[in-house]
Amino acid sequence: MDKTRLRLAIQKSGRLAEDSFELLKLSGLKIQPNKSGLFYRVKNFPLDLLLVRDDDIPGFVADGVADLGIVGSNVFEEFSLTHADKQSNTLLPLGFSKCTLNIAIPSEQNYNSMADLAGKNIATSYPQILSKALAAKNITANIVEMHGAVEVAPKLGIADAICDIVSSGATLEANGLKSVENIFTSQALLLKTKSQLGPEKEQSLSRLLSRIEGVQACKETKYIMLNAPQTALPEITKLLPGADAPTVMPLEGQNGAVAIHAVCRESVFWETMENLRDAGATSILVLPIEKMMV
Ligand code: PRP
Ligand code: ZN
């Protein structure tokens, strides 16, 4: 393997892949796609991408086939529970591809507690995480391991319940299932191999990390501008999500009215804007921040 170019394993296609490519793009990386679809070179940074199935990523990073990997913590946890001997470092949570691992049953069935699952057949691609969750509640069930199409298992009579990833909930709904337990909360993680990288790669990695941290800071941070009567200032300041001290400027020729500018370190939702308006704010603008170095 090249001693100077980092190798990052990412998902070939799927939601995690989209989010991973987006992060790399926002980090200023120009990716050169190639026909093989397996190995992409980054033109303006000493980094190459290995495009693989997400389930293969923790193993590739643990074995040093890739220096880095982006994978859901669900897949990473399942791998780690299965292969105690194959370790990687978690560098940082990436805050995207958020989902939960839920147990779901046919919608028409009653459910009181996890004890209802005792002795049942539960289909899942995450047998280790599921068995750990069941064991924590002292419940014995029969785990049916499936890879793909888990959500149709109850309809086919293969299982009584399933344990699968839920993001929007559309898959469960389309299959007449309802979620009854949330056993794991997942988001994308950046993994690093335990193998030595050498000084050049370590230096590239720290540059990459500082860009990723900048992207993360920007994503949540917004610049908000609004006008309001001076008297509404205390209430409005309270409503601004995660803001440092706002800048307050008098509005020329408008008695008692001020312009308020603030950097908000949390998402600004429509509800927040409605509350600001109700508190007397007008001309509310929320602007994205393009780049940030923290
Ligand atoms: C997961 C899961 C469901 C779907 C749920 O698969 O297996 O099929 O997403 O999402 P929803 O709640 O928005 O409908 P995914 O394609 O993300 O990954 P996987 O096939 O690698 O498990
Ligand atoms: Zn997968």
Image (spheres, rainbow, N blue to C red):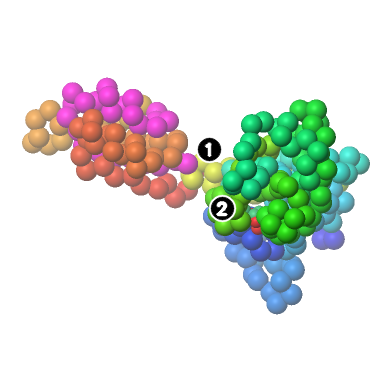
User: Label 2: how many residues lie within 10 Å, few (<14), some (14-19) or many (20+)?
Assistant: some
- 146 up-or-down from 232: above or below: below
Answer yes or no: is residue 222 visible: yes
- 172 up-or-down from 284: above or below: below
Q: Residue at x 65, y 71 (%)?
A: 33
Closest to the observer: 173 or 6? 173
173 relative to 161 in the view: left or right: left
The three-letter amino acid code for the residue at tag 1 is: Val
149 relative to 217 in the view: left or right: right
Closest to the observer: 163 or 57? 163
Closest to the observer: 117 or 49? 117
Within 8 Å of ligand 1, the CB of disc 2? yes
Mark 2 vs mark 1, CA separation in Å: 42 Å
Callout 1: SS: loop
Query: In the image, which residues are magenta?
Result: 220-244
Q: Residue at x 18, y 23 (%)?
A: 231
The residue labelled by disc 2 is 173
Mark 2 or 1: in front is 2
Q: Residue 108 at x, y = what percent? A: 59, 46
Residue sticking out furthest to the bottom: 35
Q: Residue 75 at x, y = what percent? A: 74, 48
Q: Residue 94 at x, y = what percent? A: 62, 44
Tag 2 near tag 1, CB within 8 Å: no
71 relative to 287 in the view: left or right: right
Q: Residue 144 at x, y = what percent? A: 81, 49
Checking the image for residue 294, the label placed there is 1
Of the residues under marks 2 and 1, which one precedes in the sequence? 2
Please state, as top left, top right, bottom left or bottom right, where the N terminus lies in the image.
bottom right
The three-letter amino acid code for the residue at tag 2 is: Glu
How many numbered marks does the figure carry?
2
Q: Residue at x 48, y 44 (%)?
A: 218
